[in-house]
Image (spheres, rainbow, N blue to C red):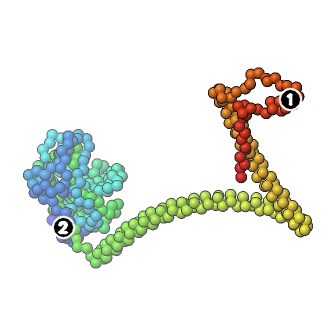
Amino acid sequence: MHRHIWTFAIAILLVNPLVGQQRIYGSFDVPAFVEDFNETKGSFPTITTVENYYTVDDSTYFMNRNHPTQPFAVMANYPNELRSFHLSSSLKLGPSETKEQMVGLIFMSQRDSNSAYVFEFNRNKRYRIRRIRNGKVTMMGESVDGWVKSNALLGVDEYNKLEVKTANGDYDFYINGSFVTSFYDNTFEFGNMGFFLGPATKARAEYFYVYTTEPSIAEVEKTENELRIEQLEKENERLKAELAQSLDAKIVELQGVIQVLETQLVTTNRDNEVLREEIEQYEEIRYLVGNIDKDLLLTLSRNLRDEMRKNQALTNENVQLKDSIDILLDEHEKFKLNVLDKIVDGTYKVNAEEPIVPQGTEKKNANESATPTKETELPTRKAKKRN
């Protein structure tokens, strides 16, 4: 009897050698993301390149990775932020000449780093769980390469149902409804999900479901508080931006005012310097004037005034004389031109022979000859007097 019990226990261990204690209980009844691939809804991308061919085909999601050495992850268009969820999908490997085919689920994928969990199986009925953190891979199993033999897996070209349940850092893993392992790891709080294909692998997926639980009162309050904090942070950032913009405008305005004031200050300093020099000159004059006798100052002032008036009168007279001289010079020039005109015209006559003057009349004739004849008499002009 005891021998049969031990045999049954050994058989269980061979089926699930890494069976751990189940950590998560309860149900996940709230659908968060449901994809049956009955039609193309854009939940998963359609990719048609030389190395990758992913598309919805015959109510399944067909995946073909053509690269011989590198795997590839295709993510669902679902930005997951759930910390507690139940992820399930039905996958099968297609026929292939290589034995290195593998397919599985990728979850808790981080956008800002090369980090995620991968739950996958191969055609040799083995599964493994890997944690990738900043590109560094850690096997979550006991073997070197992480692969664990499991009779829960079906063969090639048969669908295998993979399930992941997580809450508060605990993880439970199921294959075709059978619990296989669990662990605790709080490296990631939440992340995106999708399919993970190994190199040179063909596979199909029947569905991709994500369920979660009804939030508790504490979780609702926490979520509301987080939303309120997020709103306050956004409002704070907006106010900071407005304040910075307003301060920048004020700074520019004040800089302009400062520049104007500096210009005015330079002008004021220059004016003050001129006034200071004038004040110094005035102080010298005032000092000199203050030391002169009052009567003497009055006398000197009167004499100075009289001299200035005389000087002004002489200046005016000098101006009048200059004007008279200019007029005379002008009349003289006109007279010369008149004479020259008459000579040229022949109207100006000069006696060729001197008349014989009798004795006794020399003086008279001399006097008469001294007077020019009417023909030789030159016109006289008077200088105009300028007021």
To which residue does mark 2 refer?
31
Task: Give coordinates of residue 321: x percent, y percent.
Answer: 76, 47
Amino acid type assigned to the residue bearing label 2 in the image: Pro
Viewer-proximal residue among 321 and 367 = 367
Q: How crowded is mark 2: few (under 14 residues within 10 Å), some or many (20 or more)?
A: few
Q: Is residue 359 something that shows in the picture?
A: yes
Q: In this view, does 343 lie to the left or right of 118?
A: right
Q: Quadrant of residue 182?
A: bottom left
Q: Nearer the viewer, residue 64 or 185?
A: 64
Q: Is residue 129 something one can see in this rendering? A: no
Q: Residue at x 75, y 49 (%)?
A: 320
Q: Where is residue 296 in the image (x, y as percent from the top left)?
A: 91, 65
Residues under labels 1 and 2: Cα distance?
A: 164 Å
Q: Image quadrant of residue 110?
A: bottom left
Q: Residue at x 76, y 32 (%)?
A: 372
Q: Which dot marks residue 361?
A: 1
Q: Position of residue 230 (x, y in %)?
A: 35, 69
Q: In this view, does 26 lie above or below 162?
A: below
State yes or no: discs 1 and 2 in contact (Cβ < 8 Å).
no
Residue type indicated by callout 1: Thr
Q: Nearer the viewer, mark 1 or mark 2?
A: 1
At horizontal 23% and vertical 59% (from top left) the residue drawn is: 78
Task: Pick the residue in front: 103 or 11.
Answer: 103
Which of pointers 1 and 2 lies earlier in the amino acid sequence? 2
Q: Residues within 10 Å of mark 1 (few under 14, many from 20)?
A: few
> Where's the N terminus, which quadrant?
bottom left
